[in-house]
């Protein structure tokens, strides 16, 4: 396997993007992808709204898509954006890296940013692992995201039943001893499409479920400890109910699907939160569109006839996020 540096692929790291995002009170979208249609939708939406973008790949997605193909897809994404008329900044980021070896391998195959997620480890082990990744990454100009605190829900194969909120008194020690470029925190978001049970929610006058608010008090305390330091929010899908309804209308069986309200994310984006991770909403958009075609056009068997509408729906969703949720519109 030939080593390749991200700069050769036309990618950028997160340094300048995060600095501008904090100053400008918006957040950069980090959209997960693992196939061509998702990548096309992300790039075309971000070009159209002139937004910088973080293309995010989990270790499972990397295995699924193949590391060599991914490198060329990321390079293709940069060229595709130019062809569409906007040279937007594109980051290729490893999501939830769980070992030094995986981070090193990604850095050697063109990633411009990696997350080392030691949040499930004892504190000192998280520091040691994160620091080791930072040393290798920085020698190659690659940015590193670390994590403190544990989100409830499923992250790759790790399941946590309850949130362990980030402890503000740990963050100064963690960021200074590790040298990370950004810090993912736990303030009440979680992965997947079932972020809250109905019992955790209240109802408004129309009977719509309102989830408990994010812990902005913890976020504010963290910002006081590390002023101006880039903060990352995982688990930030809003789980649009129209997608859930379409999926269930056409044979799906999603139950109690509840996400983070968009106004909560807009509030977070205006703070030191400068990267917001969204995966599940894309999965829902794609599944809703595919199910609708499958159910309403049973004679259809050309994949372009269901992946095409899925791609169109994804593009709409991503454009909506940059304009109405993250505020990254026009910041490329
Ligand atoms: O945080 C997890 C991301 O949504 C990626 O999910 O590991 O199923 O690719 P995945
Ligand atoms: P969602 O499951 O809320 O989309 O979160 C995605 C994420 O945090 C990827 O790291
Ligand atoms: Zn995540």
Image (tube, rainbow, N blue to C red):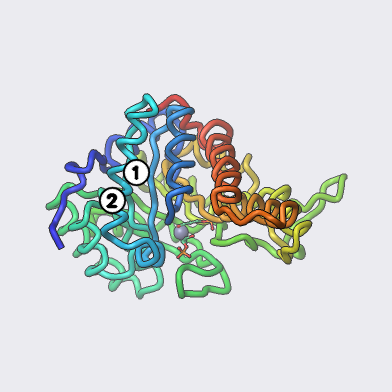
Pointer 2: what residue? 113
Q: Residue at x 45, y 53 (%)?
A: 32
Report the front residue among 50 and 148. 50
Q: What residue appears at the point 62 percent right and 54 percent down from the top-left corner?
A: 284
- Residue denoted by label 1: 229
Relative placement, left or right, of 216 versus 295 is left
Please tell me how crowded label 1 is: few (under 14), some (14-19), or many (20+) other residues with Cα within 10 Å. many
**Residue drawn at 27 percent across, 44 percent down:** 75
Q: Secondary structure at mark 2?
A: strand
| In this view, 94 is above or below 47 | below
Classify mark 2 as within 8 Å of ligand 2 or not, answering yes or no.
Answer: no
Q: Position of residue 272 (x, y in %)?
A: 43, 40
Relative image position of residue 60 (x, y in whole percent): 40, 67
Give the foreground label among 2 and 1. 2
Find numbered disc 1 in the image and state the secondary structure of the residue it sits on.
Answer: loop
For residue 254, side relative to residue 172 (left or right): right
What distance separates the C-alpha of mark 2 from that of mark 1?
Answer: 17 Å
Residue 50, position as x, y percentages in the image:
43, 27
Front-most of residues 302 and 214:
302
Closer-to-camera residue (293/22) = 293
- Report the side of 241 relative to 139 (left or right): right
């Amino acid at each position: 396997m030939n080593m390749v540096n991200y700069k050769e692929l036309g990618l950028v790291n997160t340094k300048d993007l995060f600095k501008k995002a904090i100053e400008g009170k918006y957040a950069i979208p980090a959209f997960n992808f693992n196939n061509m249609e998702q990548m096309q939708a992300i790039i075309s939406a971000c070009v159209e709204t002139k937004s910088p973008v973080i293309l995010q790949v989990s270790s499972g997605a990397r295995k699924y898509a193949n590391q060599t193909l991914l490198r060329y897809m990321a390079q293709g994404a940069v060229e595709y954006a130019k062809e569409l008329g906007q040279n937007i900044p594109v980051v290729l980021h490893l999501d939830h890296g769980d070992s030094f070896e995986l981070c090193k391998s990604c850095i050697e195959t063109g990633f411009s940013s990696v997350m080392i997620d030691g949040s499930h480890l004892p504190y000192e082990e998280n520091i040691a692992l994160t620091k080791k990744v930072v040393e290798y990454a920085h020698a190659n100009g690659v940015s590193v995201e670390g994590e403190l605190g544990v989100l409830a829900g499923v992250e790759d194969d790790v399941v946590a039943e309850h949130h362990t909120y980030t402890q503000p008194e740990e963050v100064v020690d963690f960021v200074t001893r590790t040298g990370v470029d950004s810090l993912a925190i736990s303030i009440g978001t979680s992965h997947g499409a079932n972020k809250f049970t109905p019992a955790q929610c209240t109802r408004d006058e129309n009977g719509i479920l309102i989830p408990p608010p994010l812990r902005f008090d913890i976020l504010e305390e963290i910002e006081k400890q590390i002023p101006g330091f880039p903060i990352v929010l995982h688990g930030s899908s809003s789980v649009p109910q129209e997608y859930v309804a379409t999926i269930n209308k056409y044979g799906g069986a999603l139950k109690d699907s509840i996400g983070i309200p968009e106004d909560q994310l807009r509030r977070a984006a205006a703070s030191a939160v400068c990267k917001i991770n969204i995966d599940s909403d894309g999965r829902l958009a794609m599944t809703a569109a595919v199910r609708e075609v499958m159910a309403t056009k049973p004679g259809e068997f050309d994949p372009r006839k269901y992946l095409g509408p899925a791609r169109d729906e994804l593009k709409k969703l991503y454009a909506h996020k940059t304009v109405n949720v993250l505020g990254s519109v026009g910041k490329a």
